[in-house]
Each structure stands twice: as structure tokens, then as C-alpha cells.
Amino acid sequence: MPESDRPAPVPDLGTFMAADTPEGKPRLGKVTAWDGEFVHLQRPGGGGAWMAVPGELRRPTGEERALIRVLTTPVAKAGRVQQTCPESPVVLSVGPVAPAVAVPGCATCDAAAERERYSRRAYDHSAAADFRVEIRNHPHGDPMPTRRERP
């Protein structure tokens, strides 16, 4: 039997092989199957499968083996990084904020103070702060001048 008619040896399953391409960049793959005519290969690190004739395949060079190692090495799962502070955290308030004090005789302030106490009992501290601001900003002096009507 002439040398050219002899079938090419089929690479073992799981081995990495290379195939030269017309572009000059070799195609690398891991042998996953052989159907009698074609060798089925999968790209290193996963990806699309491809087929080649056993005679077109060769062993990868040292540089190609290094690339295969890089592509098939699993990346370590990143654990949660412990955040550290160079100094202790700032404490914004140590104790509870004192309840609002309504101006005596002001119905608006009385209503806002009652709503603030209710919000504090319901642990709605945001609403309680809003009512304290309302009492603080509520005008109690002379009424604000209004716009004069045009004659």
C-alpha cells in the first residue's frame, strides 16, 4: 500500500491538536469524538465545536501548548473581599433625637407634634424628622406680607 493511501492515525480522545489554516493562524482544539471520517474538536476553554480530517491535524507547538494552558486554566472564583477602614466609623447619633416641641397655642404645630409622636411610635423616623422640620420652619411671628391686589 502506498504511503499516501495509508489512513492517518486518529488522535486519542481528550488530547489537544492543531490544524493549520490558510490565514496562517492555527486552529486549536480538544478531540471530543471521531465518527470514522472526521475528528470532532472543541476550542480550548469551551466554545464552538469543529471538525477536521485526521491527516490535517498535528501536535501543538510549545507556544500553542502555552496558549492552550492559559485558555483552559479555570479562573479562581472571586470571594468577597473584606473591606477594612483605616479608622473607626463615624457615629452620627448616639441617642434618640428629642421629640419636637410645639409652640403653645399653634394648631399647626400641635398637629405636626402629634404626627411626629405617632411616627416615632411606628418607627418611621423619616416621617418623624419631616414633622420636626415642619414645626421648626412653621412661621410664628407676624404673618408674611401678601401680595397687594391691583386696583
Image (cartoon, rainbow, N blue to C red):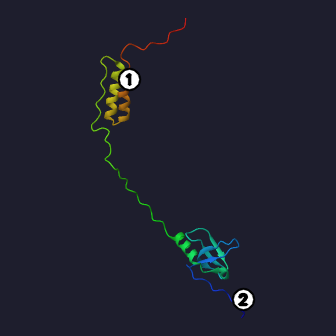
Question: Dividing the picture into quarters, in which one does residue 143 lie?
Answer: top left
Compared to residue 120, the image places residue 54 above or below, namely below
Locate the N terminus by quadrant: bottom right
Against 81, is 70 above or below? below
| Residue at (47% x, 13% y) in the render | 146
Q: Nearer the viewer, residue 19 or 96?
A: 19
Could you tell me the amino acid type at mark 2? Answer: Ser
Label 1 sits on residue: 137
Mark 2 neighbour density, 10 Å: few (under 14) some (14–19) many (20 or more): few
What secondary structure is found at the residue carrying circle 2? helix
> How far across and down, in percent of the image, does residue 64 sit?
58, 74
Query: Left or right: where does residue 128 sit relative to residue 50?
Result: left
The picture places residue 67, in percent across and down from the top left corner, at: 56, 72
Q: Is residue 133 visible?
A: yes
Report the quarter where the C terminus lies.
top right
Going by the numbered disc 1, the residue's amino acid type is Asn
Give the mark, 1 or 2, whose residue is nearer the N terminus. 2
Any part of residue 37 in sight: no
User: Tag 1's secondary structure?
Assistant: helix
* Numbered badge on residue 18: none
State the image coordinates of residue 63 (x, y, percent, origin top left).
57, 75
Q: CA distance from mark 1 to mark 2?
A: 98 Å
Q: Work out which residue is located at the far left of the displayed protein and give it.
A: 95
Q: In the displayed structure, does residue 73 sit left or right of residue 83?
A: right
Please report contact status of discs 1 and 2: CB closer than 8 Å, yes or no.
Answer: no
Few, some or many residues within 10 Å of mark 1 (<14, 14–19, 20+): few
Q: Which residue is mark 2?
A: 4
Residue drawn where x is 71% and y is 73% of the image: 22
> Which residue is at the front of the view, 86 or 114?
86
User: On the image, which quarter does residue 127 sit in?
Assistant: top left
